[in-house]
Amino acid sequence: MNKKAFVGVLVVVILISFWFFNITQTKECSAKDGTCKIKEENQLTAERIKKEIKDNKALLVDVRELDEYQAGHAKESINYPLSKIDMDSEVNLDKNKKLYVYCRSGNRSSIAKAVLDDKKYQVIDLGGLADVEQLGFDFIK
C-alpha cells in the first residue's frame, strides 16, 4: 500500500470512528431542566461485548503478533494478527459475527478495521490495550 493510499484509508477510518462514536452515544435530554445524558444502553462496555460473545454474536480480536498476545491479553479475546489479516486473501473469521478489534496503541486495530471493512466484516475498533482495559475487560498476563 503506497503512502497516499494509506493516508486516505487512515482519514476514512478516523471519520468513520467519529461518526460511529457519535451515533453510539445517543443523548437523552430533559425538557424540564435542559440537561442531557448519554443513554446507557448505547454505550460500549465490557459487559455488553461479553454478552455478545457469550451469545455467539461477536468476537473480541487482538490483532497484535502472537508473542505480544502471549505476554498479556483480554481474557475473552482471540489472536488474529494484523500481519495475517493483511496477507490472507480470505480471512478465517466468521462474517456473521461482529468483530471488536484492539491492539497495543490503536494503530494496528484501525488498519485491521479498514482491511476487514473492505472484506465486508462488521468491525468495531476498540483502540489500544488501555482503552480495552478502561471498558472493563480483565487481562491474562
Image (spheres, rainbow, N blue to C red):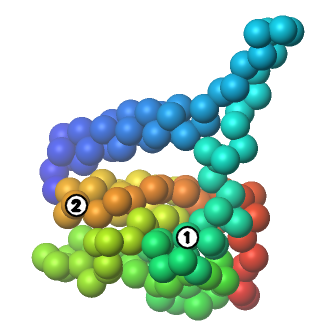
> Mark 2 sits on what residue?
120
At x 55%, y 56%, the residue is 127
Is there CB contact under 8 Å for labels 2 and 1?
A: no
Q: Position of residue 66 (x, y in %)?
A: 47, 88
| Image-quadrant location for residue 114 | bottom left
Q: Which is more N-terminal, label 1 or label 2?
A: 1
Q: The disc labelled 1 sits on which kind of residue?
A: Glu
Of 71 and 112, which appears nearest the observer? 112
Q: SS of the residue at dot 2? A: loop
Q: Residues within 10 Å of mark 2 (few under 14, many from 20)?
A: few
Residue 103 can be seen in this image: no
Q: Compared to 78, does 107 lie above or below?
A: above
Q: The disc labelled 2 sits on which kind of residue?
A: Lys
Q: Position of residue 121 (x, y in %)?
A: 29, 63
Of badges 2 and 1, nearer the viewer stands 1
Q: Which mark is residue 52?
A: 1
At x 31%, y 38%, the residue is 12
* C-alpha separation, residue under disc 2 versus residue under disc 1: 19 Å
Q: Residues within 10 Å of mark 1 (few under 14, many from 20)?
A: some
Q: Compared to 139, does 10 lie above or below?
A: above
At x 84%, y 8%, the residue is 32
Q: Is residue 104 left or right of residue 16?
A: right
Q: Is residue 126 left or right of residue 12?
A: right
